[in-house]
Image (cartoon, rainbow, N blue to C red):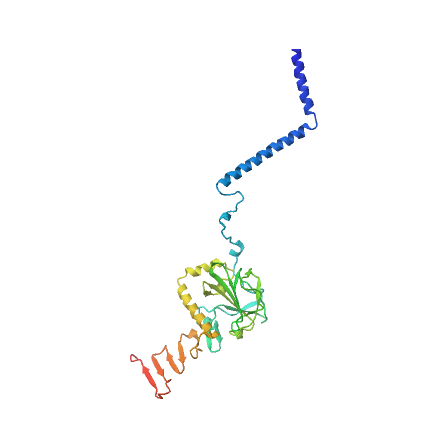
Amino acid sequence: MREEEKNQSSRGSSFKRFFKKRWVFPALYIASAAIILTGVLWYQTASNNATDKYGSKSTDIAGKKYKQPSVEVNRAMENFTMPVKNAEEAMIEKKFYDFSGKKADQEAALVVYGNTYAPNTGIDITMKNGGTFDVVAALSGTVTKVEEDSLLGNVIEIEHDKGVVTQYESVKDIAVKVGDKVDQGQTIAKAGQSTLNEKAGTHLHFEIRKDGVAVNPESYFNKPVSALAEVNKSNSIPDAKKEQQKIDNSQKDANGKSSINGDSSKNPSDGANTNTDNGNAKTDNGNTNTDNGNPSNPSTDTTTNPNS
């Protein structure tokens, strides 16, 4: 019995002496940390192998594996702004021609060039002091046209998402070129003058078009691009495109790109339709056709509607 007690006491004292050594506890801590770290690494390796089995990775961004184009959130949230740097000093010299507007407003929105009248497809912006000013992008986009035009006073076109295009006419000192990406508020040119609207002096002609149809810019300032999506849902879109074609044709006539038959000085808002061709006059609003243009026949041939 005494020998066994001696053996047990000797074993206990040896353990105590072992743990009293300075290096024992640090060694135990290091060994424990190594075991834990090994377990973590093993778990991560096992997890990666499991995800790779199904063709995905834990670090994949959603949709990245399909290489889909990303959408800039800031651009999608942009609202149309006045295309000038100092909007508080700007004023609208000529408004947009609204086919459903009042007659007085329509007459005020006509652009007079020579003996022709053309509906204004945008707005003409000037400064209160009449001086030049910085023209900025009303919305972020890509420059698709930079064109010198003596009649319109040079043109810049910027394309945006969802078929929306903004156009800047009567500009000078152009600071962008085709293909440039521009940010909203970035200076793209300075306001200049145009032959088409000399009366406005130094100004910017600004347009917003949706799928080729000009819309009133004032109706969309401080509104997002998504507001223009309602244009496509309108039942009057086919009529709007027809009216737009009329406007474009009248502008081409003023620009000399297509022939002008006689004197078209009649105000289009009056509803009359008068064409003159080498002395042959035809009036659509009346029921009388008169032909005095034949020099070999000095007599006057008058045809009167028998129903009158």
Residue 105 in percent (x, y) is at 46, 71
Between residue 166 and residue 65, name the one nearer to us.
65
Residue 236 in percent (x, y) is at 40, 64
Q: Is residue 100 visible in this depiction of the protein?
A: no
- The residue sitting at 63% across, 30% down in the picture is 31
Residue found farthest to the left? 306
Residue found farthest to the bottom? 298
Q: Is residue 25 visible in this depiction of the protein?
A: yes
Residue found farthest to the top? 1
Between residue 102 and residue 149, name the one nearer to us.
149
Q: Which quadrant of the figure contains the C terminus?
A: bottom left
- The residue sitting at 35% across, 83% down in the picture is 290
Between residue 146 and residue 169, name the one nearer to us.
146
Residue 166 in percent (x, y) is at 50, 64
Residue 157 in percent (x, y) is at 51, 65
- The residue sitting at 62% across, 33% down in the picture is 34
State whether residue 231 is above or below residue 305: above
Between residue 21 and residue 57, name the one nearer to us.
57
Total marks in image? 0
Q: Which quadrant of the figure contains the N terminus?
A: top right
Does residue 279 appear left or right of residue 79 in this picture?
Answer: left
